[in-house]
Image (spheres, rainbow, N blue to C red):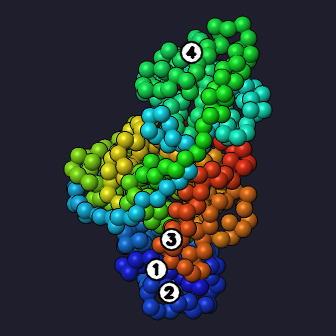
């Protein structure tokens, strides 16, 4: 088992793969020499491989993750006490295409639900979607009473409550309308009841045009103020949808129909070494078979954005990526806030020091594929390959955005652990084996075994097979626990 790893030969630091004690002499994987440890180092944290001078960039992953604010001697801890970010505001960028190419692979299949428009779903659920928070309790009551219909091809009944839909303006209101419309037309839903109040800004008649080509036999609407008993009327519609869904069955579908969201949260110092590279290799495998993946969390690209920019398939996609990054920085600046107020306390406890450190680990999830398209918030995937999506780093907001963009499943890597789930199956992938053992009720897949042996291609193939099983009906931990929710990106004033 490796105990200390240098990720890139240019790195000035290595990462501890187990707790290290002052006085130990440790062989450095990837470096070919042993290092005297001068102070205790927590697993996932960094140690200096050589003397690093004050003002010198600190290199990890082959890129700067910040600057030394004091002299750091060889063998000592490199972290928040002696490092600060080099990030600032918007930048001028230059396109230096790297022209990445993927090896093609034979197309594989999963067992999914083929929809009338040619899309495939990995679940056949009945969703109740309120247009406004005022009817949340009605939606929850309908969900409770409709549990009786679960069974056979009706795999779940779920109400996705939220506090929005009224007292919003401009882009903030547009975001709500688009997200609700996207979810109502998601292929994982075999039936949808869109539940309105009747006097809200984003009512049913307003949202319908955003849905474009929906199946009227699968998507039904109810305005609560228009009926004497909204619960009775809602249950009547649900029964109609259930009858329609009973005729659905799983069939063989090519994996090229899969769209998979890529997300991380509660990251630690091993996330960029185990879980995220595994997801990245998985992404390349899926894309090589014609599928699509979506990378989001734009603020957690800051410091690694040029890597993605130079992988853009063409100049136009590069320009969209520049806007993706600088527009999000401008969003922070418009509020008088720094764009680098990150990482979180949990990230730091796990060994992540700066936003650059976090970003370089985060973007490992993108693999090596070219960037094929860049999506605005609430836009849907239309292009196979690697897509970048505008959304913040917040776990539930970003995961909901991935689902709304068309993701059938979200792969969510974590070093600290989290129980939540978004509207689609949310696969939790641990970066370390300790987390996988302690929180087996949260974690679906352990990538932490990579530090004990094995290869990245083998681990990614294992993940690929697991994702196919989830796409074919195997439940994730969040589904077993009944943890599914949604959150919409709040970007404006409330009336």
| Mark 3 vs 2, N-terminal side | 2
Q: Residue at x 60, y 80 (%)?
A: 452
Q: Say whether marks 3 and 1 touch (CB < 8 Å).
A: no
Cα distance between the residues tagged 4 and 1? 56 Å
In primary-sequence order, the first of circles 3 and 1 is 1
Quadrant the N terminus occupies: bottom right
Q: Which residue, given by chain and number where applicable, does mark 4 sit on? A: 200
Mark 3 or 1: the one toward you: 3
- Determine contact: label 4, label 3, CB under 8 Å: no
Where is 245 relative to 1, above or below? above
Q: Which residue is under mark 3? A: 273
Q: CA distance from mark 2 to mark 4?
A: 61 Å
Please state which of residues 154 and 367 is positioned toward the viewer in this rendering.
154
Specify whether 304 is left or right of 14.
left
The CA span between labels 3 and 2 is 15 Å
Secondary structure, mark 2, is: strand
- Give the labeled residue for mark 2: 28
Q: Earlier in the sequence, mark 4 or mark 1?
A: 1
Disc 4 secondary structure class: loop
Q: Distance from label 2 to label 1 (Cα)?
A: 7 Å
Report which residue position mark 1 lands on.
6
Q: Quadrant of the C terminus?
A: top right
Nearer to the camera, 192 or 262: 192
CB of mark 2 within 8 Å of CB of mark 4?
Answer: no
Q: Residue at (58%, 21%) from the top-left corner?
A: 220
User: Is residue 234 visible to us here?
Assistant: yes
């Amino acid at each position: 088992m490796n105990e200390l790893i240098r990720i890139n030969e240019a790195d000035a630091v290595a990462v501890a793969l187990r707790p290290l004690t002052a006085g130990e002499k440790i062989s450095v994987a990837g470096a070919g020499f042993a290092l005297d440890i001068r102070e205790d180092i927590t697993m996932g944290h960094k140690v200096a491989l050589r003397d690093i001078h004050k003002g010198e960039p600190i290199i990890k992953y082959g890129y700067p993750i910040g600057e030394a604010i004091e002299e750091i001697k060889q063998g000592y801890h490199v972290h928040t006490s002696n490092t600060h970010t080099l990030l600032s505001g918007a930048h001028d960028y230059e396109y230096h295409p790297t022209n990445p190419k993927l090896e093609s692979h034979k197309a594989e299949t999963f067992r999914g639900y083929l929809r009338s428009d040619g899309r495939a779903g990995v679940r056949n659920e009945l969703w109740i979607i309120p247009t406004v928070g005022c009817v949340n309790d009605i939606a929850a009551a309908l969900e409770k009473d409709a549990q009786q219909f679960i069974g056979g091809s009706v795999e779940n009944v779920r109400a996705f409550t939220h506090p929005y839909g009224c007292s919003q303006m401009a882009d903030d209101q547009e975001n709500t309308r688009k997200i609700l419309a996207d979810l109502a037309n998601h292929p994982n839903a075999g039936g949808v009841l869109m539940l309105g109040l009747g006097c809200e800004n984003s009512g049913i008649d307003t949202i319908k045009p955003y849905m474009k080509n929906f199946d009227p036999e699968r998507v039904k609407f109810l305005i609560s103020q228009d009926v004497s008993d909204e619960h009775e009327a809602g249950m009547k519609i649900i029964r109609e949808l259930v009858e329609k869904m009973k005729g659905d069955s799983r069939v063989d579908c090519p994996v090229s129909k899969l769209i998979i969201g890529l997300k991380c949260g509660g990251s630690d110092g091993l996330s960029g070494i185990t879980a995220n590279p595994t997801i990245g290799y998985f992404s390349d495998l899926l894309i090589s078979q014609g599928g699509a993946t979506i990378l989001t969390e734009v603020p957690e690209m800051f410091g690694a954005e040029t890597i993605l920019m130079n992988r853009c398939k063409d100049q136009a996609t590069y320009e969209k990526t520049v806007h993706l990054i600088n527009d999000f920085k401008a969003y922070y600046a418009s509020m008088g806030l720094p764009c680098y107020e990150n990482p979180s306390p949990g990230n730091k406890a796990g060994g992540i020091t700066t936003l650059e450190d976090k970003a370089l680990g985060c973007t490992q999830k993108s693999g090596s594929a070219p960037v094929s398209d860049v999506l605005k918030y609430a836009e849907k995937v239309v292009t196979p390959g690697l897509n970048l999506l505008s959304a913040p780093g917040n776990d539930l907001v970003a995961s909901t955005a991935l689902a709304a963009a068309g993701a059938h499943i979200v792969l969510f890597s974590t070093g600290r652990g989290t129980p939540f789930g978004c509207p689609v199956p949310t696969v939790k992938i641990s970066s370390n084996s300790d987390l996988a053992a302690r929180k087996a009720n949260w974690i679906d897949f352990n990538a932490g075994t990579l530090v004990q042996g094995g290869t990245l291609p083998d681990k990614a193939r294992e993940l690929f097979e697991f994702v196919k099983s989830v796409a074919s009906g195997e439940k994730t931990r969040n589904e077993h626990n009944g943890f599914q929710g949604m959150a919409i990106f709040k970007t404006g004033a409330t009336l």
